[in-house]
Image: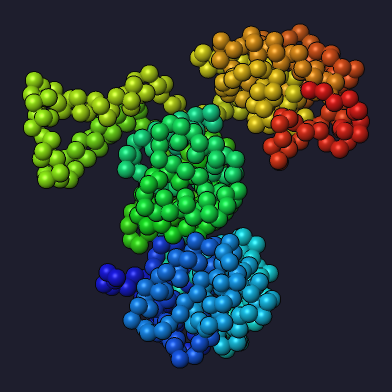
Amino acid sequence: MGYESPMPVQEEVIPFLLGDDNDVIALAQTGTGKTAAFGLPILQKIDVTTYCPQALVLCPTRELCLQIADDLNDYSKYIDNLKVLPVYGGSSIESQIKTLKRGVHVVVATPGRLLDLMNRKTVDLSLVKNVIMDEADEMLNMGFTDSINAILAEVPENRNMLLFSATMPKEIAAITKKYMKNPKEIVIGNKNEGNKNIRDIYYMVQARDKYLALKRIADFYPNIYGIIFCRTRKETQEIADKLIQDGYNADSLHGELSQAQRDYVMQKFRVKNIQLLVATDVAARGLDVDDLTHVINYGLPDEVESYTHRRGRTGRAGKTGVSISICHVKEKGKIREIERIINKKFEKGEMPTGHAICEKQLFNLVDQIEKVKVNEEEIASLMPQIYRKLEWLDKEDIIKRVVSLEFNRMIDYYKDAHEIQQVDERSTRGERGERRAHASEEGYSRFFLNFGKADGLYPNQLIELVNKCVPGKVRIGKIDLRENYSFFEVEDGEAQRVMDSMNGFEVDGRRISVEPAQGKKEDGGRGGKRSYGGRHTDDGYKGKRGGKDSGRRGGDRSDRTFRKDERDSDRPWKRTAAARDARKKRRF
């Protein structure tokens, strides 16, 4: 199989697993050769004449379950009659039960499906000698703690146990204390340390420029083969759809896909028909794909452990990889925290210019032309006609035309593209802590809106509100939310239409007020009176009186408090129960 010398984790783990009564905790990053580290010794100790499970491998996802089972089958090629069974949800449980009844030696399972089989009394774990928990921290993050406890309670006490984890959270420590006997701890590198073969780069941009930054990064690496991580299913699908529309080989992977759809997408990705896979953390757990060049974080995850697992998808088996994070200034603190945990500094990237991208793409095309395999026999009969057709062109003209044929779209796009302005983290506040002046972007008009955070307004709700009130498509620029009011920008050509349309709407009897931001003071101090367009108030702008309580700011706010509808209804905001009770009349 091409194995010549053991990798560090294999060198450390294999001798212990070949022995008796040796429990092992191995802390190692994804892609360090863990499957062979536990697979080779447990296969060596299988008694093929006894057809019952003797080794149990637990892992978090179906994809990883199948990958481990395939690897164990490869390792056992010359062990006659050894049977390995992958057990996972999303496939026929009846066929898995039939195979178990015929007899197997190694069970590779996801906790949920294995517990189901145990409850049906169709799997016997009484002769298991080795239990391996692969990516244990992932299983606990996914909520399998109770299932794991139930499974481990059914295996013999005198079995060996091996626990693999990239990180060491307190939940892992609890399991080791309860189920392991004086375990040997093997750490490859330092605890929680990031793989040194991976470069960590971040780009700090405005939130509205994140997708444009993603496109530039993808264009700057013409041979990119990677995963783009997003925070939500909705964002994952939106980014994948945009990339496909813009001509990239991309697709999405998230929890709303059926198992058949997941398998189809993953098969295309593994054979590299897809260059960019856009995925959520949950959907990508357990993916075992070789040779990824890049991992791109479309925003940093909430948990540092999630970043460790994301970046571990590249730079596997001693190869190099790149982890790129597209951030906004509020994520600066997360970067520092991740640096501390993985004991490694991020590089601050400079956003590629259009000229640099075109140059990179051009030389990639030239490399492809230079390396293309020519099938002389197949094209021999066609070449005389082609030579006659092109004989009026000299060599330089032909080269220019070939390059232009492939390259004109890229040149046309970037010659008119505005350069993306990166955010300087240090310049978000002045010397005295005052906010910077909020001048509108070139080509955009800035508006004042009489709703803010106190009304449950967030950027996505504001965008939905504009879409609901204004017919047709409106391009929205910067959004600046305050406690009792907000500012947002739209293209100059749409400014009057947006203002006229939105001022004709109400929310629960309170009229929406949209006015040009010029003359509105955007940096009110703490406390005291603030002035907005000639009107004074103690707690913010009151807006135009549309309903009977449209200007009230004191008292019970429950009748006009809104929250985001997690099911993405076609209304921008959803009233709370108190608001529904308070108002019988619904209009928007």
Q: Is residue 96 above or below residue 584?
A: below
For the point 45% across and 71% down, the residue is: 69
Q: Where residue 288 sits: x, y (%)?
A: 44, 59
Name the residue nearer the viewer: 477 or 172.
477
Q: Where residue 130 sits: x, y (%)?
A: 51, 82
For the point 28% across and 34% down, the residue is: 360
What colour scheme has been applied to the protein in the rendered image?
Answer: rainbow
Q: Quadrant of the N terminus?
A: bottom left
Q: Where residue 350 sits: x, y (%)?
A: 38, 34
For the point 44% across and 76% down, the residue is: 38
Q: Where residue 301 sits: x, y (%)?
A: 56, 47
Q: Is residue 477 above or below residue 316?
A: above
For the point 24% across and 35% down, the residue is: 365
Q: Quadrant of the C terminus?
A: top right
Q: Is residue 317 above or below residue 588?
A: below
The residue furthest front is 381
Residue 551 visible from this viewpoint:
yes
